[in-house]
Amino acid sequence: MCDYSLHLIASRPAKVADKLVSTDFARSITRGFTEVGHPDVAVCLRPGTEIAFDNPVMYDRAFSMFGKARIEHRVARFRQVNMDDPHVHHDALEFPGGQIVMVTRLIPGQTATVLQLPASPQDHHHSARATARERDTARDPAPIA
């Protein structure tokens, strides 16, 4: 997903192994991710996508007068928050310690790699069918000729 304020920016969905960089978008009031070397296209993450940062994560505190903060964890899972309010940012990262950081607070220029995408409902459906077939085959193996 891409936050509501990125609807006027060209975008594409994230893929496994994408090399991302946090950025300020020129025609937007928000920050997000682009692919390294392609600063004009937002890379949209689906909830559940896991990313790994190259360095500890730096972000702006809620009030800029309190400066920047640092998270030692380098792996995060993308999620959306405050979905009941259409007029606020939703894109966030959840870190292993439970800390949630809004993507709009990430310091620009940080790089990360997409590790894993969430399973899609279609993937789950195919997987469930395959598991059922395997279970049926195990119960009633084909006769050996």
Image (cartoon, helix red, strand yellow):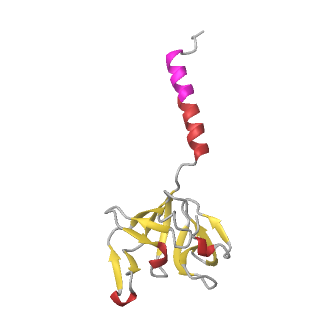
Describe residue 55's horizontal placement relative to residue 2 as left or right.
left
Q: Position of residue 134 (x, y in %)?
A: 53, 26
Q: Position of residue 110 (x, y in %)?
A: 46, 78
The image quarter containing residue 130 is top right
Residue drawn at x 44%, y 66% is 93
Q: Quadrant of the N terminus?
A: bottom right
Describe residue 86's horizontal placement relative to residue 79 as left or right.
right
Number of numbered discs visible in the structure rendering? 0
Describe residue 43's horizontal placement relative to residue 52 as left or right.
right
Q: Which residues are magenta?
A: 132-140
Closer to the camera in the image, 8 or 108: 8
> Is 47 within the magenta?
no
Residue drawn at x 34%, y 61% is 96
Residue drawn at x 50%, y 20% is 138
Closer to the camera in the image, 58 or 66: 66
Asked if 84 appears above or below 110 in the picture, the reply is: above
Q: Which residue is situated farthest in the top direction here?
A: 145
Closer to the camera in the image, 93 or 84: 84
Q: Which residue is situated farthest in the bottom direction here?
A: 65
Majority secondary structure of magenta residues: helix
Asked if 55 appears above or below 116 in the picture, the reply is: below
Residue drawn at x 54%, y 16% is 141
Q: Position of residue 132 (x, y in %)?
A: 54, 27
Q: Quadrant of the C terminus?
A: top right
